Image (cartoon, helix red, strand yellow):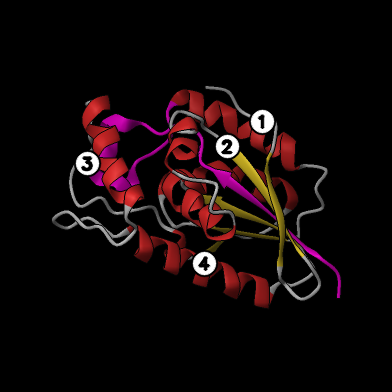
Amino acid sequence: MSHTTIYFIRHCEPDKSKFDDEFNCPLTAKGQEDCAKVTGFLRDKDIDVISSSPYVRTVETVKPFAESVGLGIELVNDFREWNIGRGWINSAEEYRSFIKRHWDNFSHQEGASERLADIQNRNIAALQKILDKHSGKNIVIGAHGMALSTIINHFDKAFGLEEFLSIAGLWPWIVRMDFDENCSFVKWLAMPFGDK
């Protein structure tokens, strides 16, 4: 058994004007163009398995690559994005304050918002199932900003609020994670890809 490499692909630029229906929110024209860059990045990575959140924007991001190499996409509902329990927050100040309250306490909940502890737990559980099922493979996972950030935080507590805010406008964003032959975490790194 050999090590496992996972490439988390945070989706390309979403059309925020369609966030009222977050599940079906598509990519912008720029986001669609950037899918080709994702495909180019992954082309020489010897990918064996592709998984994704079922949200339209994540599937749209990895689908061109999947089609180019003849692989299907395994949709995993638990990789879905954080449910903030309200519509999109347009004010930068209000958004930062809302996010900070949750990052300061992963058990914090406001109204119908999902606790970060819950999103982290379901994403880590989904990741563990992927590792158990596809150990020793090179894997792509179509992901979201907050969901991916809580995964990183699980393995590296130094990744916190400021690190999350630093990727707020970064679409796509690619993170590589390595796991040893026992599926134990080894390291993560953000790949030099994408632009703000």
The 10 Å Cα crowd at callout 2, few under 14, some 14 to 19, many 20 or more, is: many
> Disc 4 marks which residue?
124
Give the residue number, with chain letter if any, for mark 2.
173
Q: Secondary structure at mark 1?
A: loop
User: How far apart are the alpha carbons under marks 4 and 2?
Assistant: 19 Å
How many residues crowd mark 4 within 10 Å: few (<14), some (14–19), many (20+)? many
Say above or below: 115 vs 8.
below
Along the viewing direction, whichever of 15 and 183 lies nearer the viewer: 183
Q: State which quarter of the image contains the N terminus.
A: bottom right
Region rendered in magenta: 1-28
Please name whichever residue, 6 or 67, is drawn nearer the observer in this view of the structure: 6
**Foreground label between 4 and 3:** 4
Q: Which residue shows up at 27% across the image and 46% down it?
A: 101
Find the distance from the CA under tag 4 to the CA under tag 3: 27 Å
Q: Is residue 11 magenta?
A: yes
Say which amino acid is labelled 3: Asp
Count of marks placed on residues: 4
Q: Nearer the viewer, mark 4 or mark 2?
A: 4
Contact, mark 2 vs mark 3 (Cβ under 8 Å)? no
Image location (x, y in percent) of residue 34: 58, 29
Q: Residue at x 61, y 28 (%)?
A: 194
Q: Which mark is residue 91?
A: none
Give coordinates of residue 170: x percent, y percent: 51, 30
Local crowd at mark 3 within 10 Å, few (<14), some, or many (≥20)?
few
On the image, numbered disc 1 is attached to which residue? 193
- Counting residues from the N terminus, which is met first, the one under dot 4 or under dot 3? 3
Give the amino acid at mark 1.
Phe
Task: Give coordinates of residue 111: x percent, y percent.
Answer: 13, 56
Which residue in the protein does label 3 denote?
20
